[in-house]
Structure formats: C-alpha cells, structure tokens
Amino acid sequence: MTSTTSEADASPAAAADQRIWVAASDQLAEGSYLRLDINHAGETLSVIVFRYRGKCLAYRNLCVHMPRELDCEQDMIFDPTGRFLRCSMHGIVYEPLTGESVSEICTGKRLTPIGVLEDGEGIWIDDRLASPLDFAE
C-alpha cells in the first residue's frame, strides 16, 4: 500500500519553515518594540513588532497619513500615555490592537497588519506573504 502525504499533513511543517525569527519572548517587554526589515509580497518592508497588553502585534512601519516610518523622528512608537501608537513625525495616533487611526485627519485608515506568532520558542513573523530578506543578492 502506498502512503501519500496530504496538504493538511504537510502544512504545519511548511508553515514553520516560512516563519521569520524576531526575538526571544523576554526580549520584548510590555510597551517596547523591535524593528526589522522583511520581504513582504516582493517588497522590502520595515516592520514594528511590539507588546501591548501582553499580546505581540506587528504592523508595517508606515504612517497612513504620509509615507514616513512611525519611529522616523524618535526611537518610539507609543504616545506618552502608552495607550496609542503614534507617528513621531505627524502625531497621527492608532489603536494598537486594530491599527485603526483615531486621528480625525485619517479616519477610516489603518496600519497594515503583519502576521506575528508567539510560542514557546519566542516571537516570529508568521505571515504567508513574508520571507526573510536575501542578502546574497
């Protein structure tokens, strides 16, 4: 009898191979963030990974108001209260859990989410469109 592997059986290993290592969990304290560059759908993106209310989240590091990184002027992504993400150039603020702008000028716009996973090993980018940058090119 011939054995075949179904797509469902192969997907956990395939998915694990697509993850991009970010950091050990203890390297990302509440309210702090890490920044990394990844390939996302063929484009090099800056990504912010942060911990908010105990949860790891990730977004493309790009303000929806003008194409500037959220931390372009200051090495921070949260407003002084720690309640909202904030663009250091224009002051546009975002709800951390959804990426939705709470600034009137950008109502209805939101940051681009990037899949992130935290497991027993640490924190990973886990987004089907993401891959590590290939520095060999």
Image (spheres, helix red, strand yellow):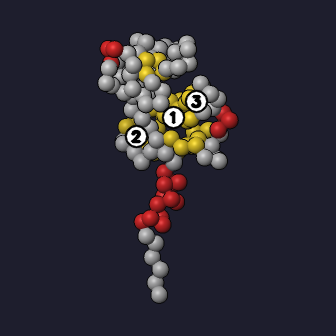
Q: Residues within 10 Å of mark 1 (few under 14, many from 20)?
A: many
Depth-wise, is mark 2 or mark 1 nearer the camera? 1
At a point 47% along the width and 87% down the height, the residue shown is 1
User: Which one is nearer the viewer's eye here, 71 or 64?
Assistant: 64
At a point 48% along the width and 51% down the height, the residue shown is 18
At a point 46% along the width and 72% down the height, the residue shown is 5
The CA distance from mark 1 to mark 3 is: 10 Å
The dot on residue 57 is 1
- The quadrant holding residue 75 is top right
Q: Which quadrant is home to the C terminus?
A: top left
Instruction: Say whether disc 2 or disc 1 marks the residue closer to the N-terminus.
Output: 2
Q: Residues within 10 Å of mark 2 (few under 14, many from 20)?
A: some
Residue kind at label 3, given as amino acid type: Arg
Looking at the rendered structure, the secondary structure element under dot 3 is: loop
Q: Which residue is mark 3?
A: 53
Evaluate whether residue 53 shows in this view: yes
Q: Which residue is mark 2?
A: 40
The CA distance from mark 2 to mark 1 is: 16 Å
Position of 40 relative to 47 (above/below): below
Looking at the rendered structure, the secondary structure element under dot 1 is: strand
Image coordinates of residue 124 in percent, x first then y, are 55, 43
Position of 1 relative to 36 (above/below): below
Evaluate whether residue 36 shows in this view: no
Residue 9 is left or right of residue 68, and the answer is right
Image coordinates of residue 94 in percent, x first then y, are 43, 22
Residue at the right extreme?
A: 26
Residue kind at label 2, given as amino acid type: His
Residue at the bottom extreme?
A: 1
At a point 38% along the width and 22% down the height, the residue shown is 101
- The quadrant holding residue 123 is top right
Image coordinates of residue 70 in percent, x first then y, are 46, 20
Q: Residues within 10 Å of mark 3 (few under 14, many from 20)?
A: few
